[in-house]
Image (cartoon, grey):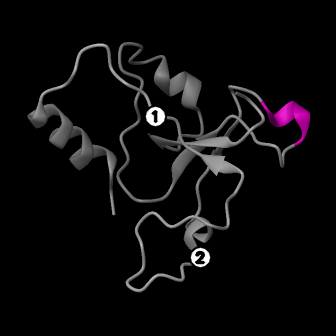
Amino acid sequence: MLGNVAEWTADSYVDDYFGESSKNPKNPWHKPSAKYSHTIKGGSFDDNPEDCSCSKRVKSLPSLQKRDPQIPRSRWWNTDSSWLGFRIVRPVIQPTVAEIETYFKEAIVD
């Protein structure tokens, strides 16, 4: 999957990601405290081959949502970033409705 599109993640960007993640290996998620910056990882077709790596991590920027023709403006508009996508995952055990609501309250910061 590396090199197709970079992956926008729910992780807040941390400079020393691997060092910080090792402090809590059971749950290495860095919960966001602001809309920017989240982590974009993996590289894309626009990047140099050496940047298409699982360890490649960059900050998301407000400019990713700069051009939005919709009125009212969309929270998720991203037309200027054809190199960026996201991965959908499914947990082994279905979370409860309360767990899902809690996750989205913590993961999506506007």
For the residue pair 14 and 65, the one nearer the viewer reads as 65
Question: Mark 2 and mark 1: span between their CA atoms?
Answer: 24 Å
Amino acid under disc 2: Lys
Instruction: Tell me the element at label 1.
Output: loop
Q: What x and y, as percent, mark residue 102?
A: 17, 40
Image position, residue 49 (x, y; %) = 89, 34
Q: Position of residue 66 (x, y in %)?
A: 59, 76
For marks 2 and 1, the one nearer the N-term is 2
Residue 48 placement: quadrant:
top right
Secondary structure character of the magenta stretch overall: helix
Q: Which mark is residue 88?
A: 1
Instruction: Report the side of 73 relative to 95 (left or right).
Output: right
Q: Confirm whether the magenta stretch covers residue 26.
A: no
Q: What's the residue at 60%, 78% (across, down)?
A: 67
The quadrant of the rendering that contains the N terminus is: top right
Camera-near label (2 vs 1) is 1
- Tell me: residue 53, above or below residue 100: above
Q: Looking at the rendering, which quadrant does residue 47 occupy? A: top right
Quarter of the C terminus within the rendering: bottom left
Q: Which mark is residue 66?
A: 2
Determine the residue positioned at 41% across, 59% down. 35
Q: Residues within 10 Å of mark 2 (few under 14, many from 20)?
A: few
> Looking at the image, which residue is at 42% across and 24% down?
28
Part of the protein shown in magenta: 48-52
